[in-house]
Image: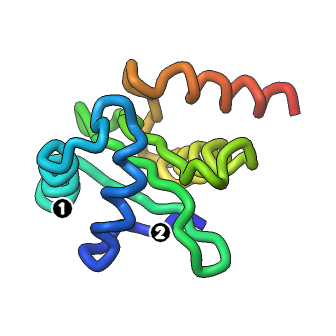
Amino acid sequence: MLIRFKKNMEKIAMGLLSFMPDEKKDVKKLQQTIKEYETNANWHLFLWKEDDDVLGAIGVRIEFENNVIVQHVSVNPSHRNMGIGKKMINELNRYYQEKYTVFASEEVQEFYKKCKMDNVQN
């Protein structure tokens, strides 16, 4: 299930975001990213939780009042290829569907398209 990021989950979120190519385990960059999610009202970070374990993170920014841009998607490497990323994308789309149009940033676009295509085929 998707849960909103809270300050007490900062280390877990930083660990998950460190798997994103742009973050590359650069601690200062990760700290800046987390700070942006904490302070910018247009940035929203969600974590994916199953059985008390946080397995993934997905972050968005809101633009132009009605667009949501997915900018971070990360799954714990030991839980990849189990559909968690797809579940996060689907849940995020459901969460924002009534008021927003969801798009993907260039960094996650390929993965986002794959998830959308999988939904059409199923």
The residue at the point 37 percent across, 30 percent down is 21
State the image coordinates of residue 105 (x, y, percent, origin top left). Answer: 38, 25
Q: What's the CA distance linking mark 1 and mark 2?
A: 14 Å
Q: Is residue 18 left or right of residue 92?
A: left
Query: Is the residue 42 above or below the residue 107 in the image?
Result: below
Query: Residue 40: x percent and y percent?
Result: 14, 53
Check disc 2 and report the residue beneath it.
Answer: 3
**Residue 45 location, quadrant:** bottom left
Q: Is residue 96 above or below residue 63?
A: below
Q: Residue at x 56, y 44 (%)?
A: 93
Evaluate whether residue 68 shows in this view: no
SS at mark 2? strand
| Label placed on residue 38 | 1
Front position in the image: 95 or 23: 23
Residue 17 visible in the current orientation: yes
Q: Residues within 10 Å of mark 2 (few under 14, many from 20)?
A: few
x and y percent of residue 43 in the render? 25, 49
